[in-house]
Each structure stands twice: as C-alpha cells, then as structure tokens.
Image: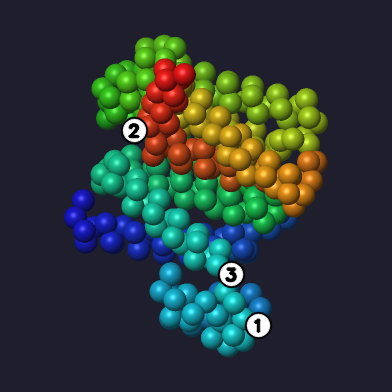
C-alpha cells in the first residue's frame, strides 16, 4: 500500500468515524436509528448548528482547540477518539488484507462493533440492528470465502482465519463445522452466564452478539476472542473495585470488551496465542 493510499484510507475512516458519532449520539432505545439521519449536527451544549468547517474529522477539533466556536465549551474528546479509532481500524485492515472485498467486510464489521461499543457505553444496550448487520456481514464473509476458495489465510480448508499454524487445533476439516462449533461455544458460555446470573452478570444483547460473531470467527479462533473480553474486563474492573471507584455489583457494559476481543484477535490473534505457549513452555 502506497503512502497516498494509506492516508486516503485513514481519512476516509475518520469520516466514517464522524458519522458513527452522529449515529451513536442520536440512537434511542425507543426509536432506534430512525431519527439519526434527520437534521444537521449541533453543539451538545449551546445547540448551535455547526458549519461544515467545524465538522472536519480531527482537524476541526485541533483548529478549534477542542472548544465550540460559539459557546467556547469543551468538545467531548470521545468524538475525536472515535474518529481516530475508525481511521486506524480501516488502515490496519487494509494493511493486513490489502484492497480486497474481504478487507471491506472486516472493516465494516469493526466499524459496527465500534458503533455498538459507544452506544453500549452510553445506554447500556446493544442494538439488535447492529447484531443483525454483523450477522449479515459475517455470513457474507463465509459466502465470499467459499466462492473465492479463501477459507483460511494459511491455505487449509478448516475455516480458520487468524491463528496461523495453530489452526491444527481446529476440530474438523470442514470450515462450516468449525463455525458452527464457534457459535455453540459462544452461546453456551455467554448464555450460561446470562442464565445462571439471571441477567445480572451478562446481558442478552451480549449473548446475541457472540452468537453472530460465531459466523465471523471460526473455532478455535473464537477461543481468543471470547477469553480476551474477560481478561481485559478484569484488568480494568478489579483496580476500580479495589480503589472503590466501582462497586462489585455495579453494572458495566460488556459490549466494548467483546469488541476489543474481536479486534485483538483479528490483528494479533497469532501473536497472543504464540506468546501464551512461549510463556507456558518457559514455565
């Protein structure tokens, strides 16, 4: 990928990130995304309609020194963070996969997970609309891989995409079977936690999301994607509980941790598993 292409992909991603901010801030549990496309963007504080030069991703934030041009109140830094994340996700996927249909599918999935995360943090809900979108994209990925004979990146037929030679852990030579196993394992784990905790430790939206992701990430890749959210959640939650900034029974959105698990598995799945086995062998 040339430098020009990389810059173009990154800034296109930041533009999508700006749009994701609009969707996330306007999403309502009652009306969904119906009102997300109505009206121009306004300042959260003074409600002043923003001009085009106030809406340029990242650059407007820097030019305005992080403050609204009209009321001079701080612009939430989350907006710029989402723009940056969307840009880097797009760039990372295209560097990894190149300019291919598979890259577009993966990028869209990661953008959907980013949007889902922001909404989950704001409202503690995972929209069914986004779960369905991820499911459709995941099935589309399976169909494309089958048509293009790209069941894996390591030239096997096991359906494993992300763990390199650790694909030997795959249960079946049939790609579809490994995706079915991934779905069952994900739903069993998260569904079990939801059922036995009566929805207190895990939301039903998390279960639906993991089920959809089973069509995206095959067995055994799904193991990493499912374990990482709990590890990251513990790394964040335990210090907060010990410092008494968070109560043990506090409700925490788990969707963002699932999204982080998927992202880490996609970009660093092989490295994570390889590091684990190296530590295990060292011990």
Residue 137, percent from left and from top: 45, 39
Q: Which residue is depicted at the point 55% across and 67% down? A: 77
Q: Is residue 109 above or below residue 231?
A: below
Determine crowd level at label 3: few under 14, some 14-19, many 20+ residues with C-alpha closer than 10 A: few
Q: Is residue 139 left or right of residue 29?
A: left
Q: Which residue is depicted at the point 56% across and 29% down? A: 227
* Location of mark 3 (residue): 76
* Location of mark 1 (residue): 46
Give the residue at the far left of this rendering: 2
Q: Which residue is depicted at the point 33% across and 52% down? A: 91
> Element at badge 2?
helix
Give the residue at the far front of this rendering: 283
Among numbered discs 3 and 2, the one appearing first in the sequence? 3
- What is the C-alpha distance between the residues marked 1 and 2? 47 Å
* Location of mark 2 (residue): 144
Do the residues under discs 1 and 2 have CB atoms within 8 angstroms?
no
- Closer mark to the observer between disc 3 and disc 1: 3
> Element at badge 1?
loop
Residue 166, percent from left and from top: 37, 20
Determine crowd level at label 2: few under 14, some 14-19, many 20+ residues with C-alpha closer than 10 A: some
- Closer mark to the observer between disc 3 and disc 2: 3
Give the quarter of the image for residue 168: top left
Residue 19, percent from left and from top: 49, 63
Can residue 140 be seen at all in this image of the molecule?
no
- What is the C-alpha distance between the residues marked 3 and 2? 39 Å
- What is the C-alpha distance between the residues marked 3 and 1? 13 Å
């Amino acid at each position: 990928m040339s430098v020009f292409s990389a810059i173009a992909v990154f800034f296109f991603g930041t533009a999508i990130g700006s749009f994701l901010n609009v969707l996330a801030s306007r999403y309502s549990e009652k009306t969904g995304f119906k009102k997300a496309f109505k009206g121009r963007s306004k300042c959260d504080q003074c409600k002043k309609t923003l001009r085009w030069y106030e809406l340029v991703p990242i650059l407007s934030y820097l030019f305005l020194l992080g403050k609204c041009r009209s009321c001079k109140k701080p612009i939430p830094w989350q907006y710029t963070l989402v723009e940056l994340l969307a840009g880097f996700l797009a760039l990372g996927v295209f560097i990894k996969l190149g300019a291919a249909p598979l890259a577009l599918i993966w990028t869209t999935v990661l953008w959907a997970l980013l949007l889902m995360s922001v909404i989950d943090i704001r409202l503690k809900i995972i929209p069914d609309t986004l779960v369905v979108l991820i499911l459709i994209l995941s099935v589309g990925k399976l169909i494309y891989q089958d048509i293009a004979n790209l069941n894996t990146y390591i030239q096997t037929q096991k359906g494993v995409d992300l763990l390199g030679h650790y694909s030997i852990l795959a249960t079946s030579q049939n790609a579809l079977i490994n995706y079915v196993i991934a779905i069952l394992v994900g739903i069993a784990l998260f569904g079990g936690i939801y059922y036995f905790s009566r929805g207190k430790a895990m939301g039903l939206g998390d279960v639906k999301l993991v089920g959809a992701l089973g069509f995206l990430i095959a067995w055994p890749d799904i193991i990493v994607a499912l374990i990482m959210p709990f590890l990251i959640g513990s790394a964040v939650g335990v210090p907060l509980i010990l410092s008494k900034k968070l109560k043990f029974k506090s409700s925490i959105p788990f969707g963002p941790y699932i999204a982080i698990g998927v992202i880490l598995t996609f970009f660093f799945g092989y490295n994570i598993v390889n590091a684990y086995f190296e530590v295990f062998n060292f011990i």
